[in-house]
Amino acid sequence: MGKKIKIDIKNKIGVTSWKTDAHERAHITIKEDICAKCPHQLCIAGCPTECFKFYDDKMTFQYEDCVECGACDIMCDQGSIEWSNPRGTYGVTYSRG
Amino acid sequence: MSKKNPEVIIVGAGPAGSATAIRLAQNNVNVVLIDRGMPIGSKNISGGVLWGNDLAEIIPDWQEEAPFERIITNKKVGFLSEEDATIMDLHFHGWNNKPYAGVSVLRAGFDEWLSEKAAEAGATVLDGITIDSLIIENGNVVGVKQGDEELRANVVILAEGVNARLMLENKLFRDPSKKQYLRKEIMGGYKEVYHLEQSLLEERFRLDGNEGMAGEFIIGNIPGDVLAGGFFYTNKNTLSIGTIVHLDSLNTGDKAYEAIEYFKSHPYIRKMIKGAELIEYGSKLIPEMGIKGFPNFYGDGWMVVGDAAGFVFSNGLLVQGMNYAIKSGILAADTYIEAKRSSNYSSSQLKQYEKKLKNSYILKDFKNFSKVKLVTKNKRLFKTYPDALNGGMKAFFTETGAEKQHLIKVILKSFKKSGVGLFSLIKDGLRFRHL
């Protein structure tokens, strides 16, 4: 196999549009204590926009870049993720789709 | 929300929800179609090619007015190894004639149009509303809630897509202990849309007029255990390009979104997007639960259609969802119309929906291809065979000045060299009958 490719996904998602809701209205929340003990952190592997980051034994979730696919909820089998759709009109807004 | 109760509430205005609404409204059913996107279509994404002609059942001349992108006349299916490719090139000129075999679509515009057709037919279409929950009384689904507001109806149709929050929240699965879909039941789709000058795109893909090309590939150049396929579809002046990743092949440290970078880095694909400008990136899940993993399709006061029901068909060569979505929507609508005659909206009547699904191509396809995962989840298909096939083909077609050997001998030698035992090779060969 060839060379490992690394990309900056945050740069790529600059072309996609969002209507971002207030922080207290975040549509996904995680339970940090569960994530800290998680044996696999596969949420990171499945997320298309790198909303999950694990630094210094702490998982963070950035709801602003979420495209609402639901992959994290399937990757997580630890019960950490509370997933709901954003309020109507908020969240990712595809113009092509 | 309106004070007067409709007969049917549909949650989600993708092809499944809008098709249901159109069929119901055409039969004078008072129906409300609710979507969380504003405008409708702005939450919707897929590959995407709409295959088949199911739309004609509700919009006979849809080809004349639907905002589709291109008529698929050329399909490529193949294996990509590190830098080589062996591809089957299907060019069916007759696919240009109506009814088209398939058309490429960009869902934001296409789904908005379909929801407008629902409104034209008489449905009440509400955009920008996220339904928070179902109202369930004595086991019957009797309506939906958003905040403090309630809307009640005889039947609620769930057309909320693959990430079916209402289905999940209310555990509408066959196995009531199931809380979420499993990694092996769902794939991740990752897609980019590139802008290309129309003339350049038509020249690059050898397209006459509004002809289009579709490509689906096994990606053999991704390191590690990640199993992924790639696709591209030509639109009018854009190119959709993406990957489908088996979520159960991901290990800690992998990034599913990187698969598309390997796909694009392959010389065969790289040339397609040369000079093109990325204009959108997005992602959706793709159900792959198969006949045993399906949710319940109906219950007291509810039915489920489209992706939310798991209706995506994929065998590696064909990937289809929107046609199943439209067809299932039409069947759910017909089930309601029949139920209305006896005013019975309980599961004893709505079970007719499952009967219709079984009699249609939908459940027949999933039944006939129930073992297809033996092929599509086979590691060797991604990690060994692309190299072996391309290696063999290259050896056969490369003139080295040495004595020529028969094709079959060269190919077999290459497969043997790849380290696959004869037994595995025969076993996998036999499995291909499931495609």
Image (cartoon, grey):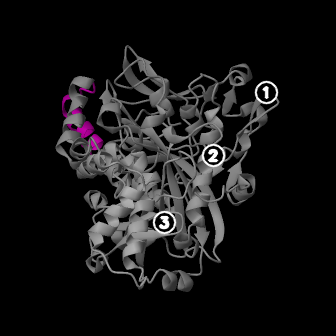
Q: Is residue B339 magenta?
A: yes
Query: How far apart are the two marked residues, 2 and 1, measured between alpha carbons?
Result: 19 Å
- Which residue in the protein does label 1 denote? A57
Which segment is the magenta one?
B331-346
The mark found on residue B255 in the picture is 2
Q: Earlier in the sequence, mark 2 or mark 3?
A: 3
Residue ID at (42%, 80%): B398
Front residue (pair B133, B343): B133
Q: Is residue B359 magenta?
A: no
Name the outermost residue toward the front.
B402
Name the magenta segment's main secondary structure.
helix
Secondary structure type for disc 3: strand
Task: Name the amino acid, label 1.
Answer: Asp
Labels 2 and 1 in the same subunit: no
Front residue (pair B87, B116): B87
Q: Quadrant of residue B386?
A: bottom left
Task: Name the amino acid, label 2.
Answer: Lys
Q: Quadrant of the C terminus of chain A?
A: bottom right
- Residue A15 lies left or right of residue B348; in this view the side is right
